[in-house]
Amino acid sequence: MMTRRHVLTLAAAVLAPATLPSPSRAQEVTPVDFAMLARRRALEAARRLTADGWKVRDQVLHHHLEPRATHLCPVFLIGGLEYLFVATIRPVEGRLQMRLLDEEGAPLATALPDQETKLQAVWHTNPSTRRALVELSVPWDAAAGDLAALYVYR
């Protein structure tokens, strides 16, 4: 059986900003490069997680976040299922905050503390079917960055 730590470690491997190809002086790495890499890594992880009964949502959120800006991502949660939402921001030194909110904005779950994996994760078992929002933000004193987020469920 996979523990919470194993899932977070795997999620970190999925979303951790990998080394992108070194750009030449005339060419820069674009956000599209990061988006494609994050999606590919998420789908690779899907194959590993399915062995333990997890299903990876075939959608990876990519968004640029400025300090003090909040991005709300609507999700539909089915009652009785376990959900793990994971997100990371590039550059790795960036800081990201993440919460799961109900439709009215009340917190359902906050980020799990995990300093080793350099990602934010929210673990939630939903008692009833409902709509929810994943809130992603960067603190006012942090650098802007490009985030990648996805969720798995079982």
Image (cartoon, rainbow, N blue to C red):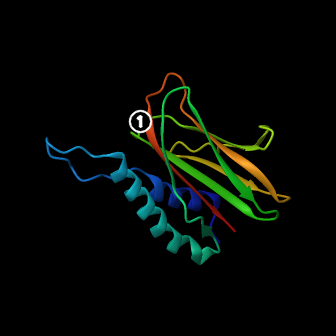
Quadrant where the C terminus is found in the figure: bottom right
- Residue identifier under label 1: 93
x and y, in percent, of residue 72 in the image: 63, 41
Q: Residue furthest left?
A: 25
Q: At 82% from the left edge and 59% from the top edge, which residue is drawn?
A: 129
x and y, in percent, of residue 51 in the image: 58, 77
- Few, some or many residues within 10 Å of mark 1 (<14, 14–19, 20+): few
The residue closer to the viewer here, 45 or 25, is: 25
Q: At 62% from the left edge and 53% from the top edge, which residue is drawn?
A: 85
> As drawn, is 148 to the left or to the right of 19?
right
Q: At 57% from the left edge and 61% from the top edge, which residue is drawn?
A: 6
Q: At 80% from the left edge and 57% from the top edge, which residue is drawn?
A: 126
Vertical arrangement, residue 73 with respect to residue 45, above or below:
above
Tell me the quarter of the picture where residue 83 sits. bottom right
The residue closer to the viewer here, 26 or 88, is: 26
> As drawn, is 5 to the left or to the right of 89?
right
Q: Residue furthest bottom?
A: 51
Which amino acid lies under the numbered mark 1 shown in the image of this protein? Glu
